[in-house]
Image (tube, rainbow, N blue to C red):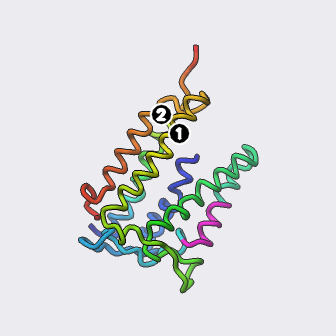
Amino acid sequence: MTSTGFAVICLLSFLVPVPILAWLDRPRRTP
Amino acid sequence: MLLLGVGFVDVLFGIFVLLGIERVTMTPGQPPGFSLDFIDWSHSLAASIFWSVLFGLAFVRRGRPVALWAGLAVFSHFILDFFMHPQDLALWPHATAHVGLGLWRLWPRGWWWFELAFIAVFGAIYVVRARRDRSFGGRPFAVCAVVLLLHLANSPWASGAR
């Protein structure tokens, strides 16, 4: 792997999970 | 906001490497699999404080406690990196003094269990708090599962970099 590939993976490994985790972290709707 | 905050300096690191401002060399077979040759603008102590303050200021309109915790989230990255990094964390950009306990190299595979212990402790705190305070953490176990999956993907056994 090149340093550029490493930098891209580093970026994606943070930026991709953030919206997924934020979506899972949202409060449950209460009736 | 907190999720982005804890990884903010690594996002900057990725951008800075792509721009040629910071440097990393891959070292296959030698833990942790890469050498962070120059990461002073994203990861040094002074830079971490600067990015923490800047990130916190972005949330001042939401109140001081929110801004404070946003800033602390960014700075927590430096504290945890201090344990893992092998003396490549400069005190300020271009400083000769570098810090880091170097668990990545001291424990070529054990570091992964050390980080897992952090995830277990803080994951448990998150689940307990989410169940008590209904304003966040609607699916706490799913959150923990995603974090565990990410940690597994980053393990010395699964990651190509290590």
Q: Is residue B77 left or right of residue B135?
A: left
The amino acid at mark 1 is Tyr
Q: Secondary structure at mark 1?
A: helix
Horizontal and vertical percent position of residue A24: 47, 34
Answer whether labels 1 and 2 touch (C-beta < 8 Å). yes
Residue at the outermost bottom position: B96
Numbered label tally: 2
Residue segment shown in magenta:
B44-53
Camera-side residue of B115 and B151? B115
The amino acid at mark 2 is Pro
Instruction: Specify the subunit that label 1 lies on.
Output: B
The residue where tag 2 is placed is B140
Is disc 1 surrounded by few (<14), some (14 to 19) or many (20+) residues within 10 Å?
some
The structure residue drawn at horizontal position 59% and vertical position 71%, both measured from the top left corner, is B45
Is disc 2 surrounded by few (<14), some (14 to 19) or many (20+) residues within 10 Å?
many
Where, by quadrant of the figure, is residue B17 drawn?
A: bottom left
Looking at the rendered structure, whether the residues under marks 1 and 2 are on a common chain is answered as: yes
The structure residue drawn at horizontal position 70% and vertical position 50%, both measured from the top left corner, is B67
Tell me the number on the disc at residue B126. 1
Query: Quick check: is B50 in the magenta stretch?
Result: yes
CA gap, disc 1 to disc 2? 7 Å
Query: Quick check: is B104 in the magenta stretch?
Result: no
Q: Secondary structure at mark 2?
A: helix
Horizontal and vertical percent position of residue B119: 44, 48
Q: Is residue A25 left or right of residue B114?
A: right
Camera-side residue of B25 and B83? B83
Q: Earlier in the sequence, mark 1 or mark 2?
A: 1
Camera-side residue of A14 and A28? A28
Q: Is residue B17 left or right of residue B65?
A: left
In the picture, which quadrant includes the C terminus of chain B?
Answer: bottom left
Horizontal and vertical percent position of residue B123: 48, 42
